[in-house]
Image (tube, rainbow, N blue to C red):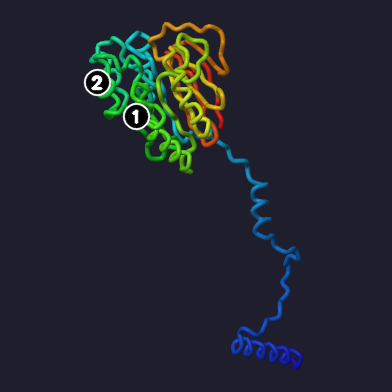
Amino acid sequence: MTFKNKKVFLFLSFVLILAVAFPSSVTLPALASAGASDVAPQNQDQAESQTQTDSEPQAQGPVQAETSLIAISDIGCKPDSIKNLKNIAVQDLPVISAGDIRYKCNAQDLKRFWDNIDVKHGVYGNHDVETGSKAFVKNLFGLGPLGWFTWKERGWNVGIIGMNQYANYDVGSAQNIFTAAALDRYQNNPAIDWILVVFHEPIRTPELDHGPNDKFKRIYEPLFQKYDKVVVLEAHNHGIWWGKNNDVNQIGCGGGGYGGDTFGGEINGFDYVSVKPGFCLMDFFPDEVSVKHIGTDGTSVLKQSSLTK
């Protein structure tokens, strides 16, 4: 070993001894290596950005609704009625009805079609409270003695309030207090994006056979206007209509098959009106409700629109 090499060896040995004895106070000298880069490595944000830039774009599938429901009302047992009930049964979705289920149909004949629909609920229509029909509808939907209710399944982003227009709904009545409390509760629940309020006789209508229930409208339309989550589901007229009318989102779904109504030509502030039979498919997204008019073949979308807050 030459003298020069011996000096280097002794120096490195001394440094190593210090490093072992005092590891936090000594920095080893950097040793240059062939091919070492002079470019500083990217920070994490730069690295992630580069990865995203160089990668293939990810395919985005359609956004799935958080809750999907079928609505059908004014049904009976006519040929179009039976087609609708059969088509709904294969959809495997919960069903909500705004009333008028039976009319003069044989209860057992009608029940066998409804038995194929697993999850269903609804409110009374004017024909449902006639003698012989009320017990059938009460048992079909499991209604309590008062006929009004709230309904929300686990994971739904919509809460349902069912109202009974054939019981006392005046200001200060038990039903009025119940409805107002349910509206407040659902409006203030961050997990609920929409409140579906269901009753039979509408608060506003296009030019069809039945006009609005003016007394009910005077009491409840101002209440519904207070809550931006509210969507009304109504029927009574044998057609399908929807739109935001006087600051309340409304869906009329009375085209269940009984039929017979005519459209006079005035939409009266709605976006869509039809007297063609079918049912309504409602998809509840966080910021909109997609509503479709499905024809009696069970697949044709006769119209699709969105309602927003």
In this orientation, which residue lies closer to the viewer: 285 or 228? 228
- Asked which secondary structure carries label 2, the reply is helix
Task: Looking at the image, tell me whether mark 1 or mark 2 is earlier in sequence order.
Answer: 2
Q: Which residue is mark 1?
A: 148
Quadrant (top left/top right/bottom left/bottom right) for the C terminus:
top right
Residue 13 in picture, x, y percent from top left: 65, 89
Q: Residue at x 33, y 12 (%)?
A: 76
Q: Residue furthest bottom?
A: 3
Residue 218 in picture, x, y percent from top left: 48, 23
The correct choice, above or below, for 230 with respect to 42 in the image is above
Q: Amino acid at mark 2?
A: Ala
Quadrant (top left/top right/bottom left/bottom right) for the N terminus:
bottom right
Q: Residue furthest front?
A: 172
Q: Residue at x 52, y 37 (%)?
A: 286
Horizontal placement of 157 versus 138: left or right?
A: right
Q: Residues within 10 Å of mark 1 (few under 14, many from 20)?
A: many
Residue 170 in picture, x, y percent from top left: 40, 27
In this orientation, which residue lies closer to the viewer: 169 or 245? 169
Residue 194 in picture, x, y percent from top left: 48, 34
- Asked which secondary structure carries label 1, the reply is loop
Horizontal placement of 229 versus 164: left or right?
A: right
Q: Residue at x 69, y 89 (%)?
A: 9
Quadrant of the image occupied by residue 236: top left
Q: Amino acid at mark 1?
A: Trp
Q: CA distance from mark 1 to mark 2?
A: 15 Å
Residue 57 in view here:
yes
Quadrant of the image occupied by residue 121: top left
Q: Which residue is mark 2?
A: 135
Q: Residues within 10 Å of mark 2 (few under 14, many from 20)?
A: few
